Amino acid sequence: MPVPFETLIPYVIITAMFGVTGAGLSGIRHYAGGGKKHRWSIDTWDRQMMDRDRRLTGVLRGQTDNPIAPAGFEVNQPWRAEKRFS
């Protein structure tokens, strides 16, 4: 018993939409990650180094090999002063 052609059209559309969304999500992750692979098992040390790299380069995944920090980095600290009670 043959399958009518009209029943295959929705399945092709659904499969194509899953492919488009998967490719779009992959592209967005690639672009947001600076062209690098996705990071796995990020612990506190990795987060601290990522924040330092972001403050040094301005990009979350950016790294620099310059041994001298840019001007203003010494006052660009991640620690925030706590709010005092009044």
Image (cartoon, rainbow, N blue to C red):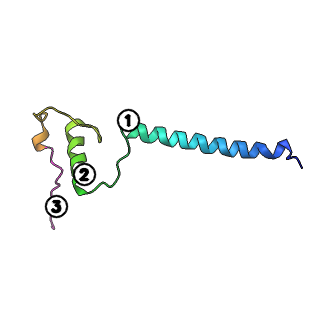
Give the residue displayed 89% in from the left and 50% down from the top: 1
Amino acid under disc 1 = Gly
Say which of 50 and 1 sits in front.
Answer: 1
The local crowd at label 3, few if under 14, some if 14 to 19, many if 20 or more residues have their Cα within 10 Å, is few
Amino acid under disc 2 = Asp
User: Could you tell whether 53 is left or right of 10 in the image?
Assistant: left
Magenta span: chief secondary structure: loop
Disc 3/disc 1 C-alpha distance (Å): 37 Å
Give the SS element for disc 2: helix
Q: Are marks 3 and 1 in contact (CB under 8 Å)?
A: no
Report the quarter where the C terminus lies: bottom left
User: Could you tell whether 84 is left or right of 46 in the image?
Assistant: left
As drawn, which residue projects farthest toward the bottom? 85
* Residue linked to disc 3: 82
Residue 16, horizontal then vertical, whole percent = 65, 41
Magenta segment, which residues?
A: 76-86
Q: Earlier in the sequence, mark 3 or mark 1?
A: 1
Disc 2/disc 3 C-alpha distance (Å): 24 Å
* Residue linked to disc 2: 46
Given this view, does label 2 or label 3 mark the residue nearer the observer?
A: 2
Give the residue displayed 47% in from the left and 37% down from the top: 27
Residue 20, located in which quarter of the rendered image? top right
Give the SS element for disc 3: loop
* Residue linked to disc 1: 35
Say which of 58 and 47 sits in front.
Answer: 47
Q: Earlier in the sequence, mark 2 or mark 1?
A: 1
Amino acid under disc 3 = Glu
Residue 18, horizontal then vertical, whole percent = 61, 45
Residue 70, horizontal then vertical, whole percent = 13, 33
